[in-house]
Amino acid sequence: MKMWVVFSVRDRLKYIGHLDLMRFMQRALRRAGLPVRYSQGFNPHILLSFAAPLPVGTEGLREVMEVPLSEAIAPAAFVEQLNAALPPLIRCQIARLVEDSQTAPMAVLAAAQFQITPLEQADVLLAAVPVLAEREQYLSTRKGKRGISHVDIRPLIYNMVVRDNALYATLALHPSGTCKPAQLIAALCEIAGLEEAPACAVVRTALLTQTFAPLEQA
């Protein structure tokens, strides 16, 4: 059996890197005394997997992880025991038992929803949203191991809505193509004529499947 777990990461803990967050969660699972399954070999560890790394500096409201179990446990008891071992800024919200044959969350993940709130120059930045929405192409510059490349991120921006001085965007999050919030902000800055990106509070509010359903329901 496996447990799919939805959890949140808030406030200052958003600055924890992905590997540190994974190690942190493994320690919490051990402290909670849950019946987790370990790998074989000289250095047994919990076979924990996250649907997608949470970018440093981004809060996550409905992150998804998969925890293999050595025996079944009621989801409600799993949530209660894990929360007792977690700090207040990381909360396990719901859990669901699935069979070992269930496809891993990362394999069905296709997109993510973000709330991007500019902390300065909000009017200027958000005024560029309809301009970007009307474009059929926008080339974003990426620096990688092979040098600088240009990627058209416009097809990777599925939806953008401005509401209450914040941008709500649905962005592709898949091995075949991903648009990061930083790329979207940079595109809006270029259109708005801003030389530097204003500080923004970024929250990943949901992870989605190819049908844009919540990932935890897959």
Image (cartoon, rainbow, N blue to C red):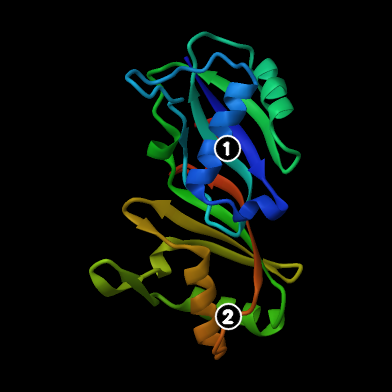
Mark 2–mark 1 contact, CB under 8 Å? no
Outermost residue, left direction?
146
- x, y (%) of residue 122? 70, 79
Q: Amino acid at mark 2?
A: Ala
Q: Is residue 180 above or below residue 123?
A: above
Q: Residue at x 49, y 58 (%)?
A: 171
Q: Secondary structure at mark 1?
A: helix
For the residues labelled 2 and 1, the Cα–Cα distance comes to: 32 Å
Q: Quadrant of residue 165?
A: bottom right
Q: Is residue 197 above or below residue 96?
A: below
Q: Amino acid at mark 1?
A: Phe
Q: Residue at x 52, y 45 (%)?
A: 20
Frontmost of labels 2 and 1 is 1
Tag 2 residue: 197
- x, y (%) of residue 25? 57, 34
- x, y (%) of residue 139? 36, 77
Return the mark for residue 24.
1
- Report if residue 212 is visible in the image: no
Q: Residue at x 28, y 74 (%)?
A: 149
Q: Residue at x 72, y 74 (%)?
A: 119
